[in-house]
Image (cartoon, coloured by chain):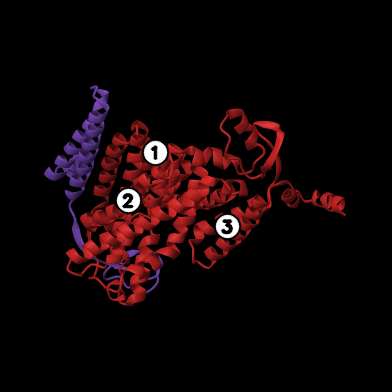
Chain colours: A red, B purple
Amino acid sequence: METFLIDFLSIFPGLELFTQISAAMGWTRIFLILLGFLLCYLGYKEILEPLLMVPMGIGMSMVNAAMLMMPDPTNPQILKPGSMFINSLLSKPDELMNAMQVFFLQPIYTLAFSNGLIACLVFMGIGVITELDFFIANPRLSLLLAICAELGSILTFPIAMAMGFNPSQSAAIAIIGGADGPMVLFASLRLAPEIFVPIGIVAYIYLSIVYAGYPYLIKLTVPKRIRGIAMSEFEIKEVSAVEKIAFSLIGGTVLCLLFPVAGPLFASFFLGIIIRETKISRFMRVTEDILLYGATMFLGFVLGCLLSADVFTDPKMFKLILLGFIALFLSGVGGLIGGYIAYWVSGGKLNPLLGVAGVSCVPTTAKVAHKCANEANPEAFIILHAMGPNIAGVITTAIITAVYVTMIPKWTF
Amino acid sequence: MRLFFLIMWNRQKTFGILLAVAGVFLARIDVFLTFEKKILLSLTTIGVLIALTGIAVYAGGMPRELKKAKGCPYCFTKNDAAAAVCRRCKKAF
């Protein structure tokens, strides 16, 4: 009977694998398949960010269901659990060339992920959808709130070091606190490529959870009366398109001179802004509709496919899950502290929820702040006020990322 | 060229650019001179801060026009205060 069962299972290598791996990995596989279903459902219901969670959930379920024993690319005599989707551990050119003919997502991973291209494409798209006027309307307040909301990306660095990560890895983990996906990918690829996969996955899952989790943090810390401050009509100090183009060129050039390692990110972001301001509608459509959303879809799907049971059972993963939570929690708290400072300084005219928008997950945190204010008081319409700190958050996170990427390799601890 | 001068001819913006250039020079001083590691790190940090201040000073010098704006409650796009329909999603306010 047992022989028959083993023969029967060998028809289905995905099921047969359960008899060849440890019980812990087997249960992790089942857990991840179910987690993929859950993420997909929560994305569909818009409880979590659908643009990321639907492709990520599908990738996570499918890759774990499709695991089978595969020859190790570095030593084909050894069989180990794997899939026909992707292999993120290869670096030698001949291994990569072979892998690209076997794994269907390998070309996208090798040619777009490991060199940071996907992060730059997303950043270019963010540039196109960024309205600089919101930031220019009140740059000092926006920057104050954005700097406060970087608390997580600053404090998580020493916490991660204390938990046994080296300075480069700690800096890459700390960037999760900036809540900006492309920055996290870029920083981890530059500083700690060996833990890029778990950092990327943890960061994107958490960035989506921000959508669902921050409202609870807000409700816990800000009384309903203060949440519902309506604020005055939004007055915008508009700057001409030529001025914004000149600012992008000068700002981009200075930042590239200061932080050449982060040059691709700055170039992509400011190119996006210039495309928007030049109003070349065909470029805008291509960048926003095709590059941004195409890159986001593949980003979610590839990250989901990278989360197979063997990656999840890596002991570092649990530390990363904890540190990712700490980073985003601290950034949310820092943002709210900044919001309260602005509230007190303005004599109660500013809604402290604007601080949460300083966490640079464009435009999710601004929407969360607006939604919470609107729930407390249907007259409160703070989205336009919240977009300023939100955009400032992108700039401060880019600068902190650039500082980490440029300075950390030079420092000796 | 004339347009370039029109944009740049502003005392605050010129000062901002000069400040940024000075900051970049200080941040990259290791190209010209050799320093002890700690001193070099301090100079780099100060240079970065001066350059970023220069960008902020430049941004502060940009001429602005004050306008009232209205946000679309459906797609959150910025619209003119007098607009009755959102310019992006075309829904009525």
Q: Which of A187 and A384 is in front in this view?
A: A187
Give the image location of residue A306, x and y in percent: 57, 47
Residue behind mark 2: A277
Mark 3 falls on what kind of element? helix
User: What residue is rendered at 27% in x and 38% in y?
Assistant: A254
In whole angstroms, how far apart are the C-alphas of marks 2 and 1?
39 Å
Bin the neighbour count of mark 1 within 10 Å (Cα to Cα): few under 14, some 14-19, many 20 and up. Answer: many
User: What residue is rendered at 68% in x and 40% in y?
Assistant: A80
In the image, what residue type sits under mark 2?
Glu
| Chain holding disc 1 | A
* Mark seen at residue A57: 3
Answer yes or no: is residue A115 visible: no
Which image quadrant: the N terminus of chain A? bottom right
Tell me: residue B33, above or below residue A129: above
**Can you tell which of label 2 and label 1 is closer to the viewer?**
1
C-beta proximity under 8 Å, tags 2 and 3? no
Both on one chain, marks 1 and 3? yes
Residue behind mark 1: A167
Both on one chain, marks 2 and 3? yes
In whole angstroms, how far apart are the C-alphas of marks 1 and 3?
32 Å
In the image, what residue type sits under mark 3?
Gly
Give the image location of residue A231, x and y in percent: 24, 71
Bin the neighbour count of mark 2 within 10 Å (Cα to Cα): few under 14, some 14-19, many 20 and up. Answer: many
- A102 with respect to A253 (left or right): right
Say how many tags the image has.
Answer: 3
Mark 2 falls on what kind of element? helix
In the image, what residue type sits under mark 1?
Pro
**Can you tell which of label 2 and label 3 is closer to the viewer?**
3
C-beta proximity under 8 Å, tags 2 and 1? no
Q: Nearer the viewer, residue B87 or A349?
A: A349
User: What residue is rendered at 64% in x and 53% in y?
Assistant: A29
| Chain holding disc 2 | A
